[in-house]
Amino acid sequence: MEQRALFGNLMSHLDKKEFSIITGARQTGKSTLLRQLEAYCRQENIPVLFFNLENKSFLAEFNQNPLNILKFLPESEKRIVALVDEVQYLDDASNFLKLLFDEHADKIKIVATGSSAFYIDDAFRDSLAGRKKIFHLLTCSFNEYLKLSGKADLAEELQNIRQNKELKSIKIDYLRNDWENYMVYGGYPAIITEPDKQEKINRLKEIRDSFIKRDILESGVLNETTFYNLFRLLASQSGNLVNVHELSRSLRIRSETVNSYLNIMQKCFHVALIRPFSKSLKKELVKMPKVFLLDTGLRNCLINNFQALPVRTDKGELWENMVFRMLLDVYSIDEIRYWRMVGGNEVDFVLPDISTPTAYEAKFDMNTVKPEKYKIFSEAYPEIPLNFLWINPFDENFFRRIQ
């Protein structure tokens, strides 16, 4: 299978003292990444062992005593890489990692994957401070989508377009067709590699129903139906402000419950809440976040809309969510903000804290771009240039606007 972009970062971190922790939603390919790291280590003669903690024998050994992992290590003068899949199944995963790091980091380097139950635990953050580096595996970028689809020629063409600003591509129509499919069905590896569109939908429904249900159970949610209804509501409102009081009234649950469910959805890597940007004007919004889903295929599955892009009534909302996903390939969630005035003036995305601050406004059609509407923002923040991103008309510059 094609290697994900994150593979190179993980490979470079193998010789660092810190343990490597791979996060991400279920079915994004974390276990596959570990197997690829195992193959790389064997190729480079790096001692390596693979432990899948769905294997009850390993799980019982490590629950009895974290140091039992040392019994499996071969004699070696080199530090041994232990790849631990599904570390959240341990009774106390944080203690397991902390003890091994504090007492045996010279002998063993752990690269671990885990799901939401582990990352919701406060002990993970507190006890592993300075002992781990977190690598976040998203669903596939468009470049990864092309490679997993077996379209290496289009992936190469995409790279050529981005590197050569004058290039006019004879393959632009093929790229547009794949881009529209990517927006509709998203970037889960199993969805990308499935050629049949109906089967793509079936697999997305399986992710929605089976794997998200496991997230719900492991996170201790008592009312599965209400949680799911909130998830669907957020999917239908992607790009909108999150008003907790309105959501609690709509679902007839307490605001505290809404906040708890929102936190779980973020920890499970299904939704992201981005904060408002504000510095100078009195009537800027400063509290309510905006919500986006981390995969557009899952968004479309939750609202049960797999229509082709040209005929969709929600193409503007889908495009804005897609722009957010594109930004995540370059920036962290904390770096991405939005700007909005109480009266309704807004800019979809502001990145004020990067080396060259910038802002983006997503418009599906270029002919709806009206720069004069953003005069208040531009006058208040002249140091932050505003860029417009559109998908129609589709040309080579589409792939050059966010890099």
Image: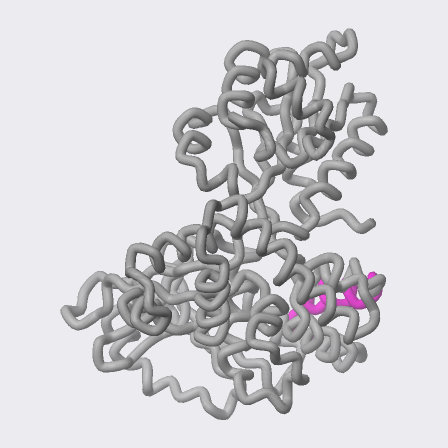
- Asked whether 272 falls inside the magenta stretch, the response is no
Residue at position x 78%, y 75% from top?
Answer: 197
Query: In terms of depth relative to the viewer, which is nearer, 343 or 27?
Result: 27
- Asked whether 158 falls inside the magenta stretch, the response is yes
Total count of labels: 0
User: Where is 220 relative to 131, above or below?
Assistant: below
* Quarter of the image where one finds residue 248: bottom left
Q: Position of residue 6 (x, y in %)?
A: 65, 45
Q: How is the image coloured?
A: one colour
Query: In terms of depth relative to the viewer, which is nearer, 338 or 158?
Result: 338
User: Where is 234 relative to 8, above or below?
Assistant: below
Q: Residue furthest left?
A: 282
Query: In terms of depth relative to the viewer, which is nearer, 191 or 385?
Result: 191
Residue 160 in view in this figure: no
Residue at position x 47%, y 55% from top?
Answer: 265
On the picture, is 194 further left or further right than 201? right
Q: From the image, which quarter does the C terminus lie in?
A: bottom right
* Quarter of the image where one finds residue 211: bottom right
Residue at position x 35%, y 66% from top?
Answer: 384
Q: What span is in magenta?
A: 152-166
User: Where is 152 relative to 373, above or below?
Assistant: above
Residue 397 in view in this figure: yes
On the picture, is 189 further left or further right than 352? right
Q: Position of residue 348 (x, y in %)?
A: 40, 72
Residue at position x 33%, y 63% from top?
Answer: 253
User: Where is 344 relative to 119, above or below?
Assistant: below
Main secondary structure of the magenta stretch: helix
Query: In terms of depth relative to the viewer, which is nearer, 382 or 244?
Result: 244
Q: Position of residue 328 (x, y in %)?
A: 53, 58
Q: Position of residue 202 (x, y in %)?
A: 73, 69
